[in-house]
Every structure is written in C-alpha cells, then in structure tokens.
Amino acid sequence: MRFAMPLVVVVALLGLLLVGLFLNPREVPSPFIGKAAPAFSIPRLEDPARTLSRDDLTGQVTLLNVWATWCVGCRQEHPLLVEIARSGEVPIVGLNYKDQANDARAWLDRLGNPYVTNGFDPDGRVGLDYGVYGLPETFVIDRDGVIVHKHIGAVTPDAWENEIRPLIAKLRTEGR
C-alpha cells in the first residue's frame, strides 16, 4: 500500500511522456487564434523613422511572416513568399526578428523582397507578444486584425495550397 501511490504517479508520468512522443510540435495550438493581434509599434526595417503597428495589419486579410537572416527555414520558404507576393493574392508583412538591420536589408536586396513592409524587432519583444518560439512563423490576420491561423515552420507549397490559400479565400468571401 505504501508503494501504491508512487507507483501510480510514475505510471501516470510515463503515460504522459508516451503520449507526448506521438504529438506533432508543429501543431501546438496558439492561444491567440480568434483574438485581436497584440498591439505594437516598432520601427520599419526599410525606414526606421516610420513605424509599423497593429493598425497596419487591419483593413484586409494579411500574412504576417516572422523571419530572420540566421533562420534556415526562412531561407527555404523565401522563394515561395516572393512568388506569393508577385501573385498579389495577399499582402505579406514581415517581422524581422532578433536580427541585424543591415544584414536583413542586404538579405532582401539579394534574395528579393516579398514584403509590403517590415517591422524591425531586434530584441524579440513583438515576437514574444505573438507567442513566437521558433522561426519562421506565419500568421493569417483577418480584416479586423484578428489572428485566425498560425503556421509554424517554413511555408511549403503544400501548406500554401492546402492550408493557407484556401483560408485566405474563405476570409475574403465571408467579408472578414
């Protein structure tokens, strides 16, 4: 009897660990889904005298892509983001995260700039407010500034065609 309680606790912990092994870390639900995007005001990467704020993410469906020059996944998704930007389907706003401004500007000059504008978040404060824990991360924000989707990891052609693009089309037809 004396060992029954510790045995139950150990078995319960092992059960939780076993369940955790089969979970996909890219499917971590965001507590921000369905809520207004957090307020912020930061310098723009391309013009530090101007600011980017949450208000710039309202009025139309927008992708907010969190990226950095040191991020391998960001480099992988970048050509697709450039292609999406050229299509004109949705404006992409960048959030340059924990980076060096000169490096970020040079990276965009060299690889192409898919962003209508970029916020510069050198200390990661805004990223933290959005619950960013790994790069890249992409948020779909509706016309009212509400976060409706979070994609963790590089946006792939499959994720774009089967997950993000249909959601954007749906948001446009619903008038949100």
Image (cartoon, helix red, strand yellow):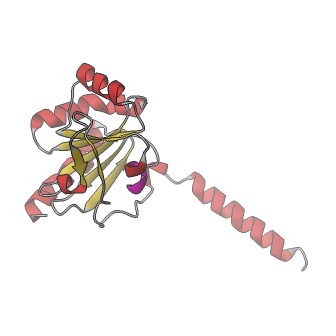
Q: Position of residue 123 (x, y in %)?
A: 44, 43
The residue depicted at 17 percent of the width and 37 percent of the height is 84
Is 129 part of what is drawn in magenta? yes
Give yes or no for residue 176 being in the magenta stretch.
Answer: no
Name the residue nearer the viewer: 166 or 109: 109
Magenta range is 127-131
- Helix, strand or loop for the magenta stretch, by majority: helix
Q: Which quadrant, please, contains the C terminus?
A: bottom left
Q: Is residue 42 left or right of residue 50?
A: right
Residue 47 in the image: state x and y as whole percent. Answer: 22, 35
Which residue is at a point 38% across and 34% down the rendered structure image? 68
When asked about the image quadrant of residue 9, the answer is bottom right
Q: Is residue 58 left or right of residue 118?
A: left
Vertical placement of residue 150 versus 12, above or below:
above
Could you tell me which quadrant the N terminus lies in? bottom right
Q: Which residue is drawn at 10% across and 36% down?
A: 87
In the foreground, 156 or 68: 68
Identify the image quadrant of residue 10: bottom right
Q: Camera-side residue: 108 or 171?
A: 108
**Residue pushed farthest front?**
49
Residue 156: image x %, image y %?
31, 37
- Most extreme residue toward the bottom is 1
